[in-house]
Amino acid sequence: MKLLYLLVHLTTGLLYFAKTKKIKEEYKQLQKEWKIRKYYLAEVYWDIQYRKKENGVFIEYPIVHHKFSEDRMVVIKTDEDLKKWESRLHCVKTEIKECCYDKDRQISIVIISIQKWIRHQIRSHLSSIWYPIVGDALYWKKKDPKKWDLQLFSVGLQTVN
């Protein structure tokens, strides 16, 4: 068995393997061609449902590595941002597929899909549109006793729409 993916962070996730070396190579090729899609479940602050269109919410801001903080990414929204950060751009898209809102807790539970993944992509994208992951102290400074909650729950082939 060959390891395909290991999520090593403060979050939970999937650990999955390929049965043979050939299957691992085929998977890696699909991954290189951006044909693999990952699905995450997260809790975010506030009601994101009103932003949701018929096909979901798409966040397509490029992101770059923070100049001074290795554990952070920065979302690029303007040309001034780009000049300020002068770093290699990662053009990625985060898609919110489904969501439901818990009015009592003021939290939305969302299903997120990404195709091309970069470290902290989901966390930085969500906070950039003012819907940070609950308890994420790195991308949202609100004190919250709960640890942040982002869980990889499914991996599959990209389907053509």
Image: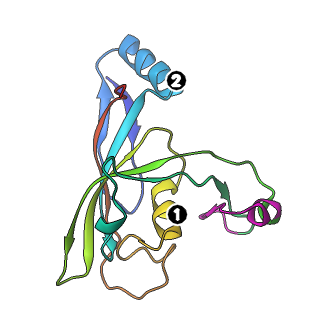
Mark number displayed over residue 124: 1
Relative depth, front residue between 64 and 59:
59
Q: Which residues are magenta?
A: 69-83
Residue 57 in picture, x, y percent from top left: 39, 55
- Comes first in the chain, label 2 or label 1: 2
Q: Residues within 10 Å of mark 2 (few under 14, many from 20)?
A: few
Q: Is residue 118 left or right of residue 56?
A: right
Q: Residue at x 42, y 15 (%)?
A: 26
Relative depth, front residue between 137 and 110:
110
Q: How many marks?
A: 2
- Which residue type does callout 2 highlight? Glu
Q: Residue at x 45, y 64 (%)?
A: 126
- Rendered position, 83 above or below 38: below
Mark number displayed over residue 33: 2
Q: Residue at x 38, y 70 (%)?
A: 133
Q: From mark 2 to mark 1, how far is it between C-alphas?
A: 24 Å
Give the residue at the far top of this rendering: 22
Looking at the rendering, in which quadrant would you find the N terminus?
A: top left
Splitting the image into 4 quarters, where does residue 142 fall?
bottom left
Q: Is residue 147 left or right of residue 77?
A: left
- Which residue type does callout 1 highlight? Ser
Splitting the image into 4 quarters, where does residue 122 fall?
bottom left
**In magenta segment, residue 59:** no
Residue 39 in picture, x, y percent from top left: 32, 45
SS for callout 2: loop
Residue 124 in picture, x, y percent from top left: 52, 63
**In magenta segment, residue 70:** yes
SS for callout 1: helix
Residue 30 in picture, x, y percent from top left: 45, 22
- Rendered position, 126 above or below 140: above
- Rendered position, 102 above or below 11: below
Looking at the rendering, in which quadrant would you find the C terminus?
A: top left
